[in-house]
């Protein structure tokens, strides 16, 4: 239990400015979710209908949840569990709400366990690309390279380990040092490369089918499953529902309204996801690959086809995968920061110990994913491998549950004046609209989507 004096045993850091926070939060949001997960999840779920629901979920649900997370964090200035002790002390809110922190820590661990393995694939592809492994390859040959990597658990394990060591080392130094510089220079570069790829593809491959696949209106393809997948994708790509943005918000100085900040993060996030779609789908159609067969390997089966043909492809390809790895790294930090911060602030561990212990736990759980693609690929539950289950349960179920609890807490339990001050809407009418969205619309939408799936599957 926390006493009032417990909080001062350590000194809590801050981002150096609001801009640093925006960079860090964008670094968290933009990652493998946008470039690896979004394209294949969209492809598996029918393309345009999924994308439409995804965008609706982002604005209707994602943006409000993101706002609530940041404002809770900034107001409470504690890790994602202890913050609820503080709210309890200051506003007599029930302590049970700290379950939000615990569900979040659990989902962060689960997500990072597979995220790290996927980041490892990206690492391996930096070198393959640089070595010219994809030069003028057929789709089949590219597929074989991919298959060879997956069926080699040692390779996957080495990369997974390397990525977790990198994560642990950075976490140990504290995410507040250095993250800004990394994001400030590397993210814009990633964006430029992505745009370059889209232009190259538009000139070379089948952009028309891509536009139709991504943006035509096909209401008959919308099913409860597609809606849940789109909701999960919205949560995953924005890094919400587990406290990552809450802990980042807790390092945010000042008291400027946060709505604008939130909007900037959202725009960056969907821009990267949509560009990734535009960069990857043309290859699918031009090489006659079946959209829903790519699975989790989609970008690794398609991007090398472009890389292998374009002038300067070695360099472009390795740079692209390198930047993607950097993006994954800045996201990974936010997945483990809530747990690490709890170890430091609640258990009084030192930062290095906390970083090493939490990363080691995640590494161990990651073995499930490593073997999901080879030795254990036939062991399934509900038709999903261990990796599939970890992903499905954390992204589509735990994050939305975390999200709904966060919004409910911020909208109904905390004094209304806090929300008003932090959001910074001056206009009375907009305040009413906002209230309606966070009190009713957003929680009701999440609950309905979750419930709908339970009753229809
Ligand atoms: N948003 C990141 C991505 O798109 C992944 C991520 C980082 C995340 N932190 C998170 C997902 C917190 C859910 C919750 O790659």
Image: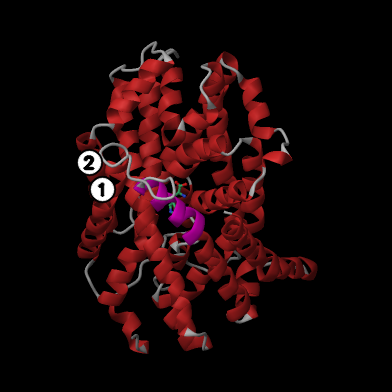
> Quadrant of the image for the C terminus?
bottom right
Q: Is residue 152 left or right of residue 40?
A: left
Labels 1 and 2 touching (C-beta < 8 A): yes
Vertical position of residue 349 compared to residue 22: above or below: below
Q: Is residue 52 magenta?
A: no
Disc number lying in front (1 or 2): 1
What kind of element bears circle 1?
helix
Quadrant in which residue 442 is drawn: bottom right
Residue 157 image label: 2
Q: Residue at x 31, y 74 (%)?
A: 345
- Residue in view at x 70 percent, y 64 percent: 441
Q: Main secondary structure of the magenta part?
A: helix
Residue denoted by label 1: 367
Position of the N terminus, as image quadrant, is bottom left
Q: Earlier in the sequence, mark 1 or mark 2?
A: 2
- The residue carrying pointer 2 sits among few (fewer than 14), some (14 to 19) or many (20 or more) residues within 10 Å by Cα, namely some
Residue 152 in percent (x, y) is at: 24, 32
Q: Nearer the viewer, residue 107 or 45?
A: 45
Task: Describe residue 171's horizontal placement relative to residue 58 as left or right.
Answer: left
Q: Nearer the viewer, residue 211 or 257?
A: 211
* Image quadrant where residue 406 sits: bottom right
Q: Is residue 341 left or right of residue 74?
A: left
Residue 46 location (% of width, % of height): 61, 36
Q: Position of residue 66 (x, y in %)?
A: 56, 60
Q: Of the numbered discs in the image, which one, if any, rests on residue 15?
A: none
- In the picture as drawn, the residue positioned furthest to the right comes out as 429
Q: Is residue 386 left or right of residue 273?
A: left
- Indicate if the residue with disc 1 has its beta carbon within 8 Å of ligand 1: no
- Which residues, given as a range, are shown in magenta? 386-398
Q: Is residue 176 visible?
A: no
In space, the residues marked 1 and 2 are separated at their CA atoms by 8 Å
Q: Is residue 235 visible?
A: yes
């Amino acid at each position: 239990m926390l006493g009032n004096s417990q909080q001062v045993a350590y000194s809590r850091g801050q981002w150096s400015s609001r801009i640093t926070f925006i960079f860090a939060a964008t670094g968290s949001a933009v990652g493998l979710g946008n470039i690896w997960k979004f394209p294949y999840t969209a492809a598996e779920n029918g393309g345009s209908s999924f994308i439409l629901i995804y965008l609706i979920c982002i604005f209707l649900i994602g943006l409000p949840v993101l706002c609530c997370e940041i404002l809770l964090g900034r107001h409470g200035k504690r890790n994602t569990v202890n913050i609820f002790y503080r709210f309890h002390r200051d506003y007599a809110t029930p302590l049970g709400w700290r379950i939000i922190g615990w569900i979040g820590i659990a989902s962060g661990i689960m997500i990072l366990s597979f995220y790290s393995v996927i980041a490892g694939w990206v690492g391996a592809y930096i070198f393959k690309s640089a070595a010219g492994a994809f030069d003028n390859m057929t789709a089949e040959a590219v597929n074989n390279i991919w298959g060879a990597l997956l069926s080699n658990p040692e390779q996957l394990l080495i990369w997974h380990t390397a990525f977790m060591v990198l994560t642990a080392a950075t976490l140990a130094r504290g995410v507040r040092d250095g993250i800004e510089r990394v994001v400030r220079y590397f993210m814009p570069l990633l964006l430029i490369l992505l745009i370059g790829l889209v232009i190259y593809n538009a000139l070379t491959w089948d952009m028309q089918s891509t536009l139709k696949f991504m943006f035509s209106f096909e209401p008959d393809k919308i099913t409860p499953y597609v809606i849940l997948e789109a909701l999960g994708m919205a949560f995953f790509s924005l890094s919400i529902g587990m406290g990552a943005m809450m802990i980042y918000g807790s390092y945010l100085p000042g008291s400027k309204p946060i709505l604008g900040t939130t909007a900037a993060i959202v725009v960056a996030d969907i821009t990267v996801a949509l560009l990734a779609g535009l960069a990857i789908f043309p290859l699918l159609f031009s090489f006659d690959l079946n959209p829903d067969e790519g699975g989790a390997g989609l970008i690794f089966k398609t991007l090398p086809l472009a890389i292998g043909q374009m002038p300067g492809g070695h360099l472009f390809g390795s740079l692209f995968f390198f930047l993607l790895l950097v993006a994954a790294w800045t996201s990974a930090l936010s997945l483990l920061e809530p747990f690490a911060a709890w170890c430091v602030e609640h258990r009084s561990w030192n930062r290095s110990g906390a970083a090493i212990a939490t990363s080691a736990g995640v590494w161990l759980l990651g073995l499930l994913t490593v073997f999901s693609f080879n030795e254990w690929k036939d062991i399934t539950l509900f038709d999903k491998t261990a990796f599939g289950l970890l992903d499905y349960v954390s992204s589509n179920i735990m994050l939305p549950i975390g999200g709904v609890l966060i919004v409910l807490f911020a909208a109904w339990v905390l004094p209304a004046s806090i929300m008003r001050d932090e959001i910074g809407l001056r206009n009375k009418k907009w305040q009413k609209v906002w209230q309606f969205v966070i009190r009713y619309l957003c929680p009701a939408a999440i609950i309905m989507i979750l419930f709908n799936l339970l009753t229809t599957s």
